[in-house]
Amino acid sequence: QVKLVDSGGGLVQAGGSLRLSCAASGGYIEPYHIKWFRQAPGKEREWVAAHSSSGGYYYKESMRGRLDIDRDNARNTVYLQMDSLHPENTAVYYCAADNGPIRSIRDPGSVRYWGQGTQVTVSS
């Protein structure tokens, strides 16, 4: 049973940056796709980014160029660097893991393990 712990959220001004962390325990992340989702108040959870177990990078189109995933298998941790943040990026961000097919890389329904979430607030 893999446990994921999200951290790194906080309050930042528009244009600022945050680096989220997803630390795993109870199992190794290496065989899993690692995904990031977010959920803003009153909205559905939406996919943000993913790093596949085979090394592929996938980013939400509207945030492309402002996101970077870094997987550190030795530390069993994945990081999501977010730059040039906008107020509309305010949400609770969740990391997730699964080993489903690549065609489901953006699908929350394929997630096997979820982190507890970390709040990101971007002020204008």
Image (spheres, rainbow, N blue to C red):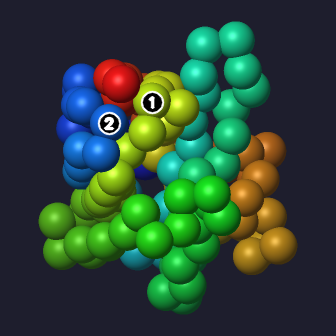
Given residues 54 and 112, the one toward you in this image is 54
As drawn, 32 above or below 42: below
Question: For the residue marked with disc 1, what is the amino acid?
Answer: Pro
Q: Residue at x 54, y 68 (%)?
A: 64
Q: Residue at x 32, y 72 (%)?
A: 71
To which residue does mark 2 refer? 14
Left or right of residue 14, residue 59 in this image: right
Residue 62 sits in which quadrant? bottom right
Please determine whether, in this image, residue 96 is positioned above or below residue 34.
above
* Residue 81 in the image, given as x and y percentages of width and height: 30, 58
Q: Is residue 21 visible?
A: no
Residue 18, x across and y down, in percent: 24, 46
Callout 2: SS? loop
Helix or strand or loop: what does disc 1 sit on?
helix
Instruction: Identify the disc placed on residue 48.
Output: none
When asked about the image quadrant of residue 39, the answer is: top right
The answer to which image quadrant residue 102 occupies is bottom right
Mark 2 and mark 1 in contact (Cβ < 8 Å)? yes
- First of labels 1, 2 by sequence position: 2
On screen, residue 63 versus residue 84, left or right, reads right
As measured in the structure, the alpha-carbon distance from the residue carrying label 1 to the one carrying label 2 is: 6 Å
Query: Depth check: 22 or 41 in front?
Result: 41
Q: Which amino acid type corresponds to the residue marked 2 in the rendered image?
A: Ala
Residue 49 picture location, percent across and down: 55, 60
Res 87 label? 1
Placement of 24 over or under 65, stated as above or below: above
Residue displayed at 33% across by 23% down = 123
